[in-house]
Image (spheres, rainbow, N blue to C red):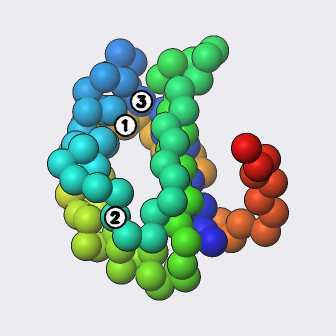
């Protein structure tokens, strides 16, 4: 499994616009194949710091193919006006997953 993770600093006061632009492709349909989870986190001390990460079940090549199919580049263009800077941005192999059983 792969975790796609990006840390962004937003332009002050643009979170709502960023969130709408970011989530638009997903709200238009179902989660793309292979994606098992997505989270958007907002800083409690700095509400303009946003962390987005998703868990993809598959290979890195499959993840990249999925991104192309769901319009990742269009999504990035839509959020660009609200992003001041990008910190960590990459793909990470999940080596431990401790999910409690219900």
Q: Quadrant of residue 57?
A: bottom right
Which residue is drawn at the image coordinates 23% and 63% (left, top)?
71
Q: Are marks 3 and 1 in contact (CB under 8 Å)?
A: yes
Count residues near mark 1 (Cα–Cα under 10 Å), then give few for <14, some for 14-19, many for 20+: some
Q: Secondary structure at mark 2?
A: loop
Q: Is residue 15 above or below residue 36?
A: above
Q: Is residue 84 visible?
A: yes
Instruction: Please give the residue where the numbered disc 1 appears in the rendered image.
Output: 83
Q: Earlier in the sequence, mark 2 or mark 1?
A: 2
Q: Which mark is residue 32?
A: 2
- For marks 2 and 1, give the CA distance: 24 Å
Identify the mark at residue 10; answer none if there is no mark.
3
In this picture, residue 69 sits left or right of residue 7 = left
CA separation, marks 3 and 1?
A: 4 Å
Q: Is residue 36 above or below residue 95?
A: above
Residue 27 location, quadrant: top left
Q: Is residue 54 above or below residue 93?
A: above
Disc nearer the start of the sequence (3/1) = 3
């Amino acid at each position: 499994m792969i975790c796609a993770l990006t840390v962004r600093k937003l332009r002050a006061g643009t979170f709502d616009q960023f969130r709408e632009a970011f989530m638009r492709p997903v709200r238009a349909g179902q989660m793309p194949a292979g994606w098992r989870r997505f989270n958007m986190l907002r800083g409690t001390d700095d509400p303009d710091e946003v962390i987005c990460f998703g868990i993809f079940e598959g290979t890195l090549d499959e993840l990249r193919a999925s991104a192309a199919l769901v319009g990742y580049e269009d999504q990035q263009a839509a959020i660009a006006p609200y992003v001041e800077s990008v910190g960590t941005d990459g793909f990470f192999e999940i080596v431990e997953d401790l999910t409690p059983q219900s």
